[in-house]
Amino acid sequence: MPDSLTPLHLAVALDGAGWHPAAWRESDARPAELFDAGYWADLVAEAERGSLDFVTIEDSLTVQSDDLVDPDDRIDRVRGRLDAVLIAARIAPRTQRIGLVPTAIVTHTEPFHLSKSIATLDYVSTGRAGVRVQISARHDATAHFGHRELPRLSLDSINTAAAQQQIGEYFAEAADYVEVLRRLWDSWEDDAEIRDVATGRFIDRHKLHYIDFEGRWFSVKGPSITPRPPQGQPVVAALGHGGVSYELIAGSADVGFVTPHDAAQASDIAGEIAALQWAAGRRRHTVRVFADLLVFLDRTQSEAQTRRRRLDDLAGVEYRSDAEIFVGTPAQLADVLQEWQAAGLSGFRLRPATLPHDLVQITEGLVPELRRRGLFRTAYEADTLRGLLGLARPANRYAIA
Amino acid sequence: MSKPIKQIHLAAHFPGVNNTTVWSDPAAGSHIEFSSFAQFAQTAERGKFDFLFLAEGLRLREQNGEIYDLDVVGRPDTFTVLAALAAVTERLGLTGTINSTFNEPYDVARQFASLDHLSGGRAAWNVVTSWDAFTGENFRRGGFLAEDQRYERAKTFLQTAQELFDSWRGDEIVADKANGVFVSDPDAGAFAHKDAHFDIHGRFNVPRSPQGRPAIFQAGDSEEGREFAAAAADAIFSRHSTLDAGQAFYADVKGRLARYGRHRDELLILPAATFVIGDTDAEAADIAHEVQLAQVSPQTAIKFLEQLWNRDLSDHDPDGPLPSVDPVVGDNTISRGRASVRMFRDSIAIANDWRAKAEAENLSTRELIAEVMGRQSFVGSPQTVAATLNDLVQADASDGFILVPHITPGGLDPFVDQVVPLLQERGVFRAEYEGTTLRDHLGLAPLPARRNHERGKRSADADAPTGVAS
């Protein structure tokens, strides 16, 4: 085994019955169980058998829709979902090592609530929590919350200056949101609980800190209700397609999910995010850049192609994705991952076209292949998500060194 | 004809952030680590309890302008812990306190519907209101309310959430692979709600959960709170655990149900209760006294005194008599983020009562505070506690109790191991769970599936107010 190679990181993105809209119609799909804990527990257990770094769980504050900004009335697609943070919490006690990274929408929700729920996910998983922050520009999500009048974005107007400015504001709000999450996670020093019977004090109040965040969209006083979580700072992830979303990754996240379509793009994006990190004053901060790939995996490439065509026929439309769509064998995918990793990426978040099929192809096909090449762990080497990602436990910004 | 024997309902309150939780005991474990919650929940389930109860905090308490440090401080997030507990328990109900002021109906409804799915129908929501700007400083909207609006908003919040829970009938997910029909109704989840507090419409994204909605709990004691519970709650978490006060509260609240077309059994009255168990009644009384003193340290006694006196008394001697100066009347400025200070409506009268009691019984400040603030509900041998508790339920002082141990996480063990078997022998408490959902445990009928035409679709009349319960 060549030991000069750096192992790559591998995550799986879980969403419903898989990412292809007809995934739920596959013979091994369990569409009637999408709202049961057992379904999610089985998927995450499978991912953990493959010693993957983490799973992400998609979420939204709307019913799924094929339309980018408006609801649709389709009945032939998976509709309805459970809260991703709560799915992760439900799974946590029944898994040991795998990281759990639910999606949370930051446009309409309260940073104080999310801070304590992710801190708590870190406690119930003993240090395996992360959160993928996502903005929502959907008009239907705004209508579910009221209060705010946000401009209606559409595909036709998306490139106008006004739309781009609004999108910039969503991402600026997300950056503020992550800043509040991080300050709240640090608002208790690790040793704040003292239980000093002589003085009757449970905590040393000088080790709790007001965060006094004041921003355009919210102000938050602090400190958190929940003490500093086991990882200090749970892992923050974000998906980006360029521009302001790369600024969010570079300026706020620990893990960025990006969507290159070849090794050259992967290299460009990694360079761009690194440059933005410098600009944001975060050059010493490690940001792991993962490429998202949507995968159809089978024993032969033609089998995979046939399956993709069959699913597209069932869906009535060719499935397209923001991410590169890979159709082939686990060994062929390993070739791509190796090449893209060499171009400057830390890891990959694979979106299984169908579940459990493509997940099992990852754990039973791709993972052994990567191990043969010395590119993937043979067993979990750390018991926290930060540990698996090679991210140090951060010092507390409020503690006096 | 004799009255039928009532079955007792028991629940366990995870020890909270009040002085009743004794953190200084060597047996006291973590209030944050999940292992404490798992052990506590599994003990409650071993005892066949109806449910576990979690409180919520949204701002750390302060006194004299500083974070209050004498009690347990800090807690994990309610929803997240309950979802994790669903993984380590099978039948136990999972009740969470969630504030309606610093949340939005869509978000809360989807979290409770999700919890109900993920627990197989074991979720309950203790709806509380809060209106203070102090707590609001942690939230996006600031969100504080005039006190007279808090029940109105809570009522309409719950009504709105109810409409969201009901926006799916429960039979829409057909997942018919052969015919390519996942959901039978393209409008599943459609809702529209407009009133003075909420103006929202769209589609709820969580299909109907096993119980239809979480069981609804209410904890307030005011006139508005009682009426709110009579209209909409499945259980009340009350603080009237004695015979006379319990019977009066019970009769009052149960008497309100008929006006809402509800039967007396459709709302359970469950007071909070503490307990100390010994081998004999005398031994239990001794332990209870020790627990009282552990709950009221000299420092805690002074802080309690300040909460009623509403002034700085840091120089006062806890082993001496009560202060001779009177409380400062008016808004309580000394203590913030603590609901109990609202009980001190007439602080001078209460101070005079305390002085009279201290003088008559020759009590120091600390002893007096321990006496008035720290009395346990049930003290005695297992036989005495079982008999007392059962008598209260059979006498309609309650339908059962939410037990609050003073030690985390092992404080429930003596009750489960020694008192529960006696109640089971008497035939007044289940020996095994009979159902799987929390509604089953509470003896509440399953909610009927909602009829199709009831759903509030967005339509021409969507602008008409649909929400406020009368």
Image: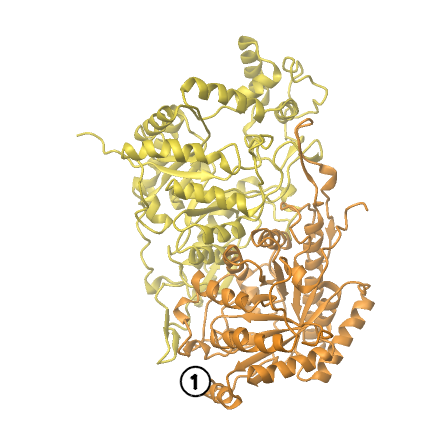
**Left or right: A101, with B441 as reference point:** right
Residue behind mark 1 = A314
Label 1 sits on a secondary structure element that is helix
Residue at image location 55% in from the left, 60% down from the top: A145
Q: Is residue A312 above or below residue A139?
A: below
10 Å neighbourhood of mark 1: few (<14), some, or many (≥20)? some
Total labels: the figure holds 1
Colour of chain A in the rendered structure image: orange
Residue at image location 62% in from the left, 64% down from the top: A132
Q: Is residue B312 above or below residue B415?
A: above
The type of residue carrying mark 1 is: Leu
Residue B134 location (% of width, % of height) = 65, 41
Colour of chain B in the rendered structure image: yellow
Quarter of the image with the N terminus of chain B is top left
Residue A160 appears in the picture as rendered: no
| Marked residue chain, label 1 | A
**Left or right: A3, with B254 as reference point:** right
Q: Which colour scheme is used?
A: by chain
Residue A257 appears in the picture as rendered: yes
Give residue B448's quadrant in the image: bottom left
Which is more toward the observer, B351 or B66?
Answer: B66
Q: In this view, does A386 lie above or below A357?
A: above
Give residue A161's quadrant in the image: bottom right
Residue A181 location (% of width, % of height) = 67, 55
Residue A321 location (% of width, % of height) = 58, 81
Which is more toward the observer, B105 or B446?
Answer: B446
Residue B180 location (% of width, % of height) = 38, 80
Judged from this view, the residue extending furthest toward the bottom is: A302
Judged from this view, the residue extending furthest toward the front is: A1
Residue at image location 42% in from the left, 74% down from the top: A29
